[in-house]
Image (spheres, rainbow, N blue to C red):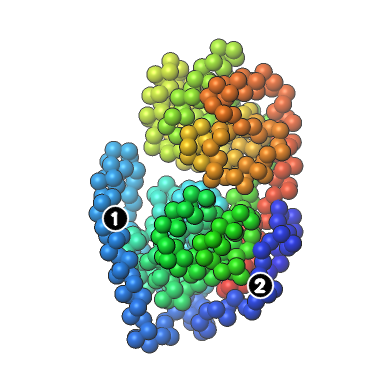
Amino acid sequence: MNSRAGGPLDGNSARSTSTRSTSIRSDLTSATPTQQRGYRPSTRNASSRWWPRVCGFLFDLPMSLAYLLLTPWLIHLVLIRGRAFGSILQRLGSWSISLPVRERIWIHAASVGEVRAAVPLIRSLQESRPGSEIVISTMTTGASDLARKMNPGVQVHLLPLELSPCIHKMLSRLRPDILVLVELEWWPNLLLACHSRSIPVVVVNGRVSEKGVKRLSWLGPLASWMARLPLRVCARSEVDAERFLQLGTAPERIQVAGDLKLDSLRGPDPLQHRRELEQARGYPENQFRWTAGCTHPGEEEQVLEAHAVLLEKFPGSQLMLGPRHVERAATVLELVRRAGLTGALESSRAGSSASVIVIDRLGQLEEAYRISDGAFVGGSLVPRGGHNLLEPVAAGCLTCHGPSMSNFTDMKALLAQQPSVLEVEDGGQLTQLVCRWAARPDAEQGQRQQALQLIEKLGGAAGRCSDLLSEVLS
């Protein structure tokens, strides 16, 4: 497959194997025109179909036990922490969707991060295959809401429980031509059901952390079996490709296509647009503002201590504080008040002049970065492995993170040469750095120019993945 020019990975660096193998479709059962529209009646006889059902039943036993043991925790999430469970019918596999009359591409993006990564791929598919129907599934209700907002006109559903009756009930109605898994969503019953129905599975933005490899290795032969089922794996980086090899994916099925999230980045808005946004939202103008995004318990306290010191030196400074899980916003607001700072929820609009604005709505963190001078990326001062550094960098923010970045080592390495991206060891260093940022407001314009130059060098993964999917579907 030919890589598109302009991305971080060209044909020499991509692990493409299509030139050394026969057509990908040779691995699939020959499809009639009716099957190509999503109708895939199995060509196997009854005696060859018993084993997937038996294996599904064997997978159902531990999953049923797991759901039973997790029931108290799920109740706690829904009733105490305010998480939404979503439609019971969809969770049981009863999707309200018509039978396909044209090519149907099913994309599963589990959570908010995967939904954002899938957006540029969906745009590319809509351009290259305009006659196709795209259906999105997610694990969380927040991701479903975001998927509907970012992909108007595309059907969005919740993935059924990992039980074979639920999965098969959904597939008997959905009948996709292909299943596209974003990052690493390997569920035994889901993979088995697709395999038994000759539905090709492709992984895009394939990402496996070092911890992920260790956890999957606990599953032994099951992990190796799941790693062999996807027809193709588009890994984010060479490191991820090597980890897929460790898990058992055949080397000829792996290629490095790059990070889809890079394609969703756009350069910083002009400063005039920022001023207009500040005026529209009632935020104070010409004051230093910084954002702490995707924070976890144990980090908010350190961020608030840093902001309290900042206010002593630069009164009028403002902090946009975005917890990783927005349902914690009320708890975080209480932390703000305990720290003796004035705070308000972002959705209230009434407290826009408060020194700390707590983000309590999905999709608002990017806007916060775009009206900020600096940013701290959470999950890194506590052992969580960090979060996406590129969003604040692309918005034109001076950016910092803590030492825990094990989930984003490749991204950290990519930005290591950027002088505007720094690592802090603890809350004390964070305080010093934020105060230094506030003392040099002239650095903002230079950082925005660097962000534009960085974005020009990155991207192209959506085109490469879209080309591969078209090859599989052809």
Q: Earlier in the sequence, mark 2 or mark 1?
A: 2
* Numbered badge on residue 234: none
State the CA–CA distance, disc 2 to disc 1.
40 Å
Give x and y (percent) for residue 464: 65, 62
Q: Residue at x 48, y 70 (%)?
A: 229
Compared across the picture, whether 231 is left or right of 79 comes to right
Is residue 348 visible in the rendered structure shown here? no
Seen from the viewer's position, the closer of residues 228 and 41 is 228
User: Mark 1 packing: few (<14 Cα in 10 Å), some, or many (20+)?
Assistant: few
Q: Residue at x 36, y 75 (%)?
A: 52
Seen from the viewer's position, the closer of residues 150 and 55 is 55
Q: Quadrant of the C terminus?
A: bottom right
Task: Look at mark 2 in the image and give the residue it sits on.
Answer: 18
Determine contact: label 2, label 1, CB under 8 Å.
no
Task: Look at mark 1 in the image and give the residue it sits on.
Answer: 66
Write down the quadrant of residue 328 in the picture: top left
Outermost top residue: 312
Q: Amino acid at mark 2?
A: Ser
Q: Secondary structure at mark 1?
A: helix
Give x and y (percent) for residue 243: 56, 57
Give x and y (percent) for residue 95: 36, 63
Q: Quadrant of the N terminus?
A: bottom right
Q: Amino acid at mark 1?
A: Ala
Q: Secondary structure at mark 2?
A: helix
Write down the quadrant of residue 350 in the picture: top left
Q: Residue at x 34, y 72 (%)?
A: 55
